[in-house]
Image: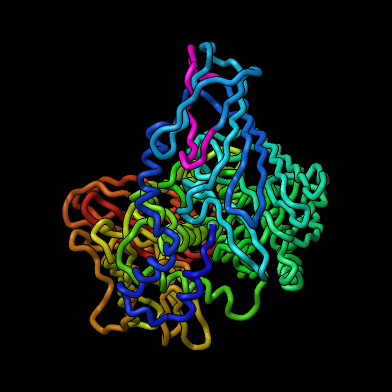
């Protein structure tokens, strides 16, 4: 889901967000639809309190009569279910009690039920079912749905024509049809059959299997045969024009991209969806094949101020690049795999935002990709705190916080790409998708797959960037007292006390004499000093020139007094020759007997070799074998329980 309002406001305010009050006001605007937040707070608690795990939903046939000129619904929901306990005789569904159930049919007879509270529909079976029994029942209901949340079931006008559309995320499905309103019970397949006056078309999930005229009405029958979460089931009804773009996929499929658009916007739509063909092919090649390739992808235009990633048919207000790229990305991240709890909504929204950024990097000229990054950094750091992890899952506004769930979530991924490297990052994401496909996921599953792909432990990273609040600020001190040795000290403060230090690889660009070199410092504590062998005179030092890091208020200072500041426990530490094109020698002397760990670390932060050394009061010489190490930047790190020190080593 993407609300365009926040985007527009941010552009208007530009970079002059003078901090916190403005930042938070954007957040409020973003959540302008959360006016019924309290209602939804109650609704979700209500839904959670009765989410019924004693049966598993397998299939739905949903039949509705909708006239977009009349705000009402008339429906029949047939569901197949399986008993998950012995003696199942009561089934709890969620359905607004503003919608009146007239009867429930089971094995050809009506059975008893009650509608209580705000959303409780309790069905009494005539006899108890043994565990694993497959069975079915049909709920017949009608009424005027409540309005709230991001919409749920909304009527509006476009060009003097009425439209009714639905948008159930996060808790709104129960406003218009009987469901289990949680995240984890996906049905395996679905039929949606909608009758409407024949001047209208109905958009929905899956394939349109028939369009039948009866008198002045049309019946649209959509069939979807992939696992689907309740909030991703949707319909939209108005006087749509339709057309199809064909997208060749990596597996040879000619995928139809079916577009239902307002007649008055047909030309703009055709331009926008044409541009999306290469984006769909890009995602298809980058991760796994388009998940629903046996059916379709599509768009249906609607009146909400953004877009919503309904499975196989995104609903969008317009055909702008960013919106279409965002909603399409959700088909992988937010449809095929859905977040397993609202705490993890960034697995949907952070990925969709991040992928939109990747399309700017790949396809757009000029400053588009740079602007994407700098805008994200400025917006996220306009407020000193806030975590990617949703710390209040009863608040619609907090779940869909644009600054945190979307933008900070996307930068969490962007920084992982930098930390792990493209190869390990994209392999890890692909294996995460394979593991969780057509199911739901939690953050720890993504972490485990990225750890497996990279060989790096990411506990600290996720503790700082997922659970923790805020961002770092860097102060870089450097000097070059003699022409071929550069000393750099990296200091860091954090914007929120929940994180004392962000361990990150820090890129710094050193330039002079018409040359430059980008050094990646493996930054493990504030005040850490590095010595870098450089054979040219530095005149310019630029912190993070490619915007890999989420940080703000950074400073770079050339100082005269800073020198190679050894920790006081360390009398001598030398690596020679440096640069080296063969084996090299580390010479060490410590003030007092101590155990230390000597590590050789490569430019991506991975430990290449490591050994424990036990010191008495002697000076030690350790010869490290070049063996088959490739040329490049390395770091030699010496670490005790109380201190550590790192030197850069260049292998030619
Ligand atoms: Zn989204």
Of 150 and 362, which appears nearest the observer?
150
**Is 22 colored magenta in this rendering?**
no
Q: Quadrant of the N terminus?
A: bottom right
Q: Residue furthest left?
A: 592
The residue under the point 38% across, 59% down is 636
Q: Taking 205 as reference, is 91 left or right?
A: left
**Is 91 colored magenta in this rendering?**
yes
The residue under the point 53% across, 39% down is 440
Of 17 and 443, which appears nearest the observer?
17
Q: Taking 350 as reference, is 210 left or right?
A: right
Vertically, is 556 above or below 262? below
Residue 207 on image: x %, y %: 76, 45
Residue 448 on image: x %, y %: 48, 42
Of 166 and 494, which appears nearest the observer?
166
Judging from the image, the colouring scheme is rainbow
Residue 332 on image: x %, y %: 62, 49
Of 163 and 228, which appears nearest the observer?
163
- How many numbered tags mark residues here? 0
The residue under the point 56% across, 56% down is 154
Q: Quadrant of the C terminus?
A: bottom right
The residue under the point 82% across, 49% down is 252
Q: Taking 433 as reference, is 193 left or right?
A: right
Give the quadrant of residue 368: bottom right
Residue 564 on image: x %, y %: 28, 72
Instruction: Answer with the quadrant where ligand 1 appears in the image.
Output: bottom right
What are the residue bounds of the magenta stretch? 83-101
Q: Let me know if residue 174 appears in the view.
A: yes
Q: Let me know if residue 531 appears in the view.
A: no
């Amino acid at each position: 889901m993407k609300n365009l309002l926040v985007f527009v406001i941010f552009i208007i305010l530009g970079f002059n967000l003078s901090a916190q009050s403005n930042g938070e006001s954007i957040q409020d605007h973003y959540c302008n639809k959360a006016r019924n937040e309290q209602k939804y707070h109650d609704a979700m608690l209500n839904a959670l309190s009765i989410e019924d795990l004693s049966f598993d939903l397998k299939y739905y046939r949903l039949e509705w009569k909708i006239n977009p000129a009349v705000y009402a619904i008339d429906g029949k929901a047939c569901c197949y279910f399986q008993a998950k306990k012995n003696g199942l005789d009561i089934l709890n569904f969620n359905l607004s009690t503003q919608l009146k159930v007239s009867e429930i049919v089971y094995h050809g007879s009506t059975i008893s039920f009650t509608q209580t509270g705000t959303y409780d529909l309790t069905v009494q079976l005539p006899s108890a079912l043994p565990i694993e029994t497959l069975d079915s029942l049909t709920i017949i209901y009608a009424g005027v749905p409540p309005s709230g949340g991001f919409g749920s079931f909304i009527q509006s006008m476009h060009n003097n024509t009425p439209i009714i559309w639905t948008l159930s995320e996060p808790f709104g499905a129960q406003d218009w049809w009987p469901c289990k309103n949680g995240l984890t019970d996906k049905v395996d397949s679905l039929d949606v059959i909608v009758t409407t006056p024949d001047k209208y078309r109905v958009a929905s999930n899956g394939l349109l299997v028939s369009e039948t005229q009866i008198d002045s009405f049309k019946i649209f029958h959509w069939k979807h045969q992939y696992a689907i979460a309740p909030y991703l089931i949707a319909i939209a009804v108005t006087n749509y024009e339709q057309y199809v773009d064909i997208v060749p996929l990596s597996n040879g499929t000619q995928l139809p991209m079916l577009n239902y658009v307002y007649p008055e916007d047909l030309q703009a739509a055709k331009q926008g969806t044409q541009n999306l063909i290469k984006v769909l092919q890009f995602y298809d090649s980058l991760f796994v094949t388009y998940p629903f390739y046996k059916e379709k992808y599509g768009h249906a235009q609607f009146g909400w101020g953004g877009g919503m990633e309904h499975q196989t048919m995104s609903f969008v207000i317009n055909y702008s690049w960013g919106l279409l790229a965002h909603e399409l990305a959700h088909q992988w991240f937010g449809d095929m795999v859905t977040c397993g709890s609202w705490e993890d909504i960034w697995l949907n929204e952070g990925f969709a935002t991040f992928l939109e950024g990747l399309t700017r990097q790949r396809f757009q000229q000029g400053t588009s990709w740079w602007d994407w990054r700098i805008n994200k950094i400025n917006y996220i750091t306009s407020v000193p705190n806030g975590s990617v992890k949703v710390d209040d899952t009863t608040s619609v506004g907090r779940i869909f916080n644009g600054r945190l769930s979307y933008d900070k979530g996307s930068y969490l991924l962007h920084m992982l790409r930098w930390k792990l490297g493209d190869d390990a990052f994209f392999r890890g994401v692909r294996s995460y998708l394979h593991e969780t496909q057509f199911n739901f996921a939690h953050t720890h599953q993504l972490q485990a797959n990225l750890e497996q792909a990279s060989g790096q432990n990411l506990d600290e990273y996720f503790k700082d960037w997922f659970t923790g609040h805020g961002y770092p600020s860097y102060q870089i001190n450097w000097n070059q007292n003699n022409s071929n040795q550069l000393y750099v000290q990296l200091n860091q403060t954090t914007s929120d006390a929940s994180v004392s230090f962000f361990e990150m690889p820090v890129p710094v660009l050193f330039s002079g004499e018409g040359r430059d070199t980008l050094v990646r410092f493996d930054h493990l504590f504030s005040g850490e000093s590095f010595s870098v062998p450089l054979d040219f005179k530095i005149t310019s030092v630029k912190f993070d020139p490619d915007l890999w890091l989420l940080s703000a208020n950074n400073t770079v200072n050339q100082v005269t007094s800073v020198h190679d500041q050894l920790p006081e426990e360390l009398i001598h530490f030398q690596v020679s020759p440096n640069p080296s094109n063969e084996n090299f020698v580390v010479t060490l002397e410590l003030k007092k007997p101590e155990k230390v760990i000597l590590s050789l670390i490569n430019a991506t932060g991975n430990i290449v070799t490591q050994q424990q050394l036990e010191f008495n009061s002697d000076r030690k010489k350790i010869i490290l074998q070049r063996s088959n190490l490739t040329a490049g930047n390395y770091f030699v790190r010496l670490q005790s329980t109380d201190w550590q020190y790192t030197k850069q080593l260049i292998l030619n």
